[in-house]
Image (spheres, rainbow, N blue to C red):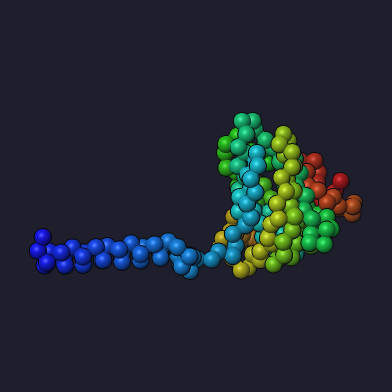
C-alpha cells in the first residue's frame, strides 16, 4: 500500500472517530443542557391505576383543581370513589367532588379536571407547595402521590381545559363567574366522594 493511500485512510479514520465522539457528547451529560425545563409538569404514580402529570391548578378564588391523566391497567372497569388531600402540615383539606362518579374503563386513558370531572380543593392548597393526594378506587384500593400546586396565571394557556373553583372552564374561571348554588351552612367534608352530595361541600 502506498504511503499516500495510508495517509488518506488515517485521515478518514480520525475524522470518523471525531464524529462519533461529538455525537456521544450530544447524548451524554451535556445533552441535558439542551432540554427545555417544563415547570408545570406534574407528578406520576404507577399501580393498577396510573396517575400521570398529576397536579393542582390554583384558581383565583383560592381553590385548586386536580388535573391528571389516569390509566386503568387492570382488566376490569374502575371508578374513583373518593379523593383526599393533605397539606404540608398534615391537615386534611376539603375536596369538592364532581356531581357524577368518574369512571375509568380498562386500558383507556382518562383526563380529569374538566367541568364534569373536577375535584376541587376548596382552600389551603397554595401555589408553590406540595400536597399529598390519595385516590380511592372501587376495586384497586388507594393510590397516594405527592403533587405540586401551580398558579394558573403562570401557565394560563396550558390549563384552558381545567375547570376553575366554580366548575367552569376558561374563559370563565373562578373569580369571573357566580356559582349556581349557594353554599350550605353544614360542616364541609374533607374527602370528596362523587355523586353522594360531597360536590356541594356537605356531608
Q: Is residue 60 above or below residue 53?
A: below
Check the picture and name the quadrant holding the N terminus: bottom left
Q: Quadrant of residue 88?
A: bottom right
Camera-nearest residue between 152 and 34: 34
Residue 82 location, x and y as percent? 76, 44
Residue at 65 percent across and 33 percent down: it is 77
Residue 26 location, x and y as percent? 40, 64
Camera-nearest residue between 129 and 155: 129
Residue 138 visible in the snapshot: yes
Q: Residue furthest top?
A: 76
Camera-nearest residue between 23 and 132: 23
Taking 29 as reference, is 19 left or right? left
Residue at 82 percent across and 62 percent down: it is 89
Residue 203 location, x and y as percent? 86, 46
Residue at 78 percent across and 47 percent down: it is 192
Residue 112 visible in the snapshot: no
Q: Quadrant of residue 27?
A: bottom left
Residue 61 location, x and y as percent? 74, 64
Amino acid at each position: 500500500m502506498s504511503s499516500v493511500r495510508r495517509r488518506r485512510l488515517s485521515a478518514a479514520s480520525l475524522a470518523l472517530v471525531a464524529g462519533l465522539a461529538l455525537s456521544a457528547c450530544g447524548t451524554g451529560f451535556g445533552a441535558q443542557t439542551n432540554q427545555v425545563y417544563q415547570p408545570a409538569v406534574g407528578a406520576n404514580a404507577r399501580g393498577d391505576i396510573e396517575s400521570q402529570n398529576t397536579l393542582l391548578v390554583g384558581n383565583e378564588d383560592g381553590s385548586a383543581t386536580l388535573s391528571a391523566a389516569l390509566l386503568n391497567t387492570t382488566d376490569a372497569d374502575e371508578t374513583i370513589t373518593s379523593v383526599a388531600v393533605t397539606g404540608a402540615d398534615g391537615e386534611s383539606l376539603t375536596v369538592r367532588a364532581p356531581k357524577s362518579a368518574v369512571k375509568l374503563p380498562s386500558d383507556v386513558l382518562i383526563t380529569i379536571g374538566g367541568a364534569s370531572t373536577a375535584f376541587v380543593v376548596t382552600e389551603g392548597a397554595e401555589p408553590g407547595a406540595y400536597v399529598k393526594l390519595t385516590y380511592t378506587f372501587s376495586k384497586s384500593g388507594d393510590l397516594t402521590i405527592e403533587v405540586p400546586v401551580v398558579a394558573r396565571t403562570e401557565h394560563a394557556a396550558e390549563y384552558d381545559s381545567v375547570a376553575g373553583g366554580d366548575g367552569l372552564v376558561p374563559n370563565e374561571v373562578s373569580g369571573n363567574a357566580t356559582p349556581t348554588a349557594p353554599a350550605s351552612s353544614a360542616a364541609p367534608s374533607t374527602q370528596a366522594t362523587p355523586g353522594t352530595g360531597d360536590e356541594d361541600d356537605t356531608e
